[in-house]
Image (spheres, rainbow, N blue to C red):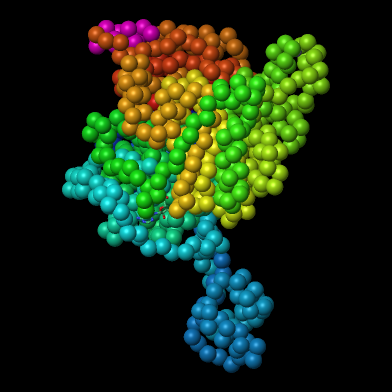
Amino acid sequence: MALDRLFTYEVPVELLGKVRVGQLLRVPFHGRIARGFALTLSDEPPTFATKPVMSIEDESPFFSPALLQLVKWIASYTASPIEVVLKTAVPASVLKPSARPKELLFVEPTGKSAELTKHQAELLADIVRVGGGWMQQLLKEFKTSPSTIRALAQKGCVSIAPRVSRRDPLAGRSVVPTQPLRLNDMQARALDTIFSGSGENAASPRPVLLHGVTGSGKTEIYLQAIGRLLERGKGAIVLVPEIALTPQTVRRFAARFGDKVAVLHSALSDGERYDEWHRIRTGEARVVVGPRSAIFAPVANLGLIVVDEEHDPSYKQDETPRYHARDVAVVRARLEGARVVLGSATPSLESWLNAKEGKYALASVPARVAGRSLPDVHLVNMQEELERAGHVPIYSSLLLDAVKSRLDRGEQTILFLNRRGYSRVLDCPECGWVAECPDCSVPYTYHQADRCLRCHVCGGWAHLPSDCPICHAKDLSYSGVGTQRAEAALHACFPRARILRMDADSTSRKFSHDDILSAFRAGKADVLLGTQMIAKGLDFPNVTLVGVLNADMSLNRPDPRASERTYQLLAQVSGRAGRAEKPGEVYIQTFQPDAAAIAAAAKGDYATFAAGELVDRHDAYFPPYCRLSTLLFRSKADALARDWADLYARSLGEWAKKVNDAANAAVFRVSEAAEAPLSKADGWFRYHVVLRTPTAKAAVDAVKWLRSARPAPEALRVSFDVDALNLM
Ligand code: ADP
Ligand code: ZN
Ligand code: ZN
């Protein structure tokens, strides 16, 4: 339970001058010992009684003054308790009282000679030759016993002492060092913009939006910008979407900067995370690569923050504090006088508008490196396929022909299936019944592997029914296409093709994501078939064909950004084709070839798409022309959630009326209380209210007022999501 309160303590005489802002302290708290961060120091004694700080847990502060300021900004901008933000900013594994560096025994020759047996003398010679080493390794390497090494220590020839041993997340993975490439003119100009266009001497340089098509060499630009800043003694943070944070990506940075790179991602062990974090804190690592939470990395003398694929929705945290790492990056850069580069082939409209309005500098790289062309994109009208075949085929004949020619030529194909809502659903053709999870308002998905029905929201499952529970018809049907079925259908067409499938079901093991990609890269398969997971950042030279099985699903979602998401998805997926010398081809199967997002994606014309979409957003008063936030009401009791959503919506409506009257314009808009698109999850009923406001603060102020004026009962969960991306 968050307290959302700050407490005041006295610095006792013996700690005077030692307590610093950002340190972790031990303090008395309600009869026990608690740990807390020092947030501010004051010379003014308070008017109330205080207890003294007991001790300093760690001399060096966990938060620099700038990071603390950032934390405070997030707390107020997301309306979250500051302690929750503090906890988000430091990994739990670092704060655990038991967390400490791993120490191993290290054996080092002393240079002293002594009377030795032949066996001892040989061993000593070996140890001297390799310059000493970890006890465990020496034992293995020289097939000796601990007692023999200890005998050498007793005679003073070697010393044995514990030494910190780094738990290296990249250990055992070979990294071949790389040198900076010769930039082409467009890349060089973009690099210039990062350094000069953004105001070389300004106290806080303007953020740079790097708009570069897929394969235009954005990563090389990041690498060279970082290289330049390292020479000036500065550090850098590189954010990448979690899903793109494969060892492949990390290797590109490690290959250029070696041990100066620290990796932070969710698959690290506690020990690895502890060590990486401390390598950052001590300055040993100067370049941090990680997902959104890496924005809090304690890099001193920060020179640059890169947000790669800045449009990616995974930068938004979907629990308290609901921050967006791209926005936090911009604010942190400003606080620390650092540069910030937001890179994407398909920028968010928020960033695009900022660039249009001159708040960001724009650097464009409109072509691929080395004269490689963007792929040819073909739209396949599935309406025509339906008329021709009498049913909707999973694969159009055009796409199948294209796959076949790749198989013949020994080139590779990626097939993409946006599975959401399009998995295999069990229904009754007689009465229309659909097998649904009783706890969530979503259909079950049929899983062939274990022959059962699974809920993708709560993870629950059920046996396959033998007949319809409503009308008892026997012939239930499976509609929709899931990755498993798409795989089976492709196999039926090309029995000899080697197909790899990648989705949430095939990648549950820790490294299998990377294993699958490595196998594909090594040419061990002809076709990679998968969900969103394969849409991002992957670079396979031998892929010359990309097929999108159904482009419409993401277009039809109840989300004001559905068009934008569809464009992004199609452009990203298409970008996987033809990245090396061989040109690429893309087939997009759709029922809506004329939809703006799909037509523009086929031409690779982001600017035209963005211009049209901005007009629509402006007319409809949607972001980036307003700030959109949601209030979500969840309860096990349907009526309770609905009634409170209603009550909040009405109160906010009254608040909005006052704001709008004063502004003489409808700038503050409140929706009616409504069932959320995901109306039930895990047995919780869900209602929401959507706010559109001129500033984020306008929404935060209204909600803060309402929360204190109308505190919700225990049985109700109300969550507030400022600048919401997910309206489900
Ligand atoms: P992006 O991040 O924009 O998708 P990458 O940085 O991955 O593009 O570059 C695509 C490929 O082109 C990579 O294999 C990269 O090594 C190569 N590349 C990048 N810049 C150059 C350059 N200036 N000269 C030659 N090859 C380059
Ligand atoms: Zn039925
Ligand atoms: Zn469920």
Classify residue 676 as left or right of residue 434: left
Q: Position of residue 441 (x, y in %)?
A: 62, 19
- Please tell me whether the stretch drawn in magenta is mainly helix, strand or loop: helix
Identify which residue is drawn at 36% across, 24% down.
613
Which quarter of the figure has residue 136? bottom right
Q: Return the residue nearer the eye: 428 or 67.
A: 428
**Residue 662 among those drawn in magenta:** yes
Classify residue 102 as left or right of residue 581: right
Which quarter of the figure has residue 568? top left
Q: Return the residue nearer the eye: 91 or 451.
A: 451
Classify residue 614 as left or right of residue 460: left
Identify which residue is drawn at 76% across, 32% down.
451
**Residue 491 among those drawn in magenta:** no
| Residue 484 in sight from this viewpoint | no
| Picture layout, residue 605 above or below residue 199 | above
Q: Position of residue 470 (x, y in %)?
A: 76, 11
Identify which residue is drawn at 40% across, 60% down.
256
Q: Return the residue nearer the eye: 339 or 121.
A: 339
| Picture layout, residue 161 above or below residue 266 | below
Q: Position of residue 381 (x, y in %)?
A: 53, 26
Magenta range: 653-663
Which quarter of the figure has residue 617? top left
Q: Of all residues shown, which one is farthest toward the left?
A: 201
Q: Of all residues shown, which one is farthest toward the front?
A: 388
| Picture layout, residue 581 above or below residue 386 | below
Identify which residue is drawn at 58% across, 45% down.
405
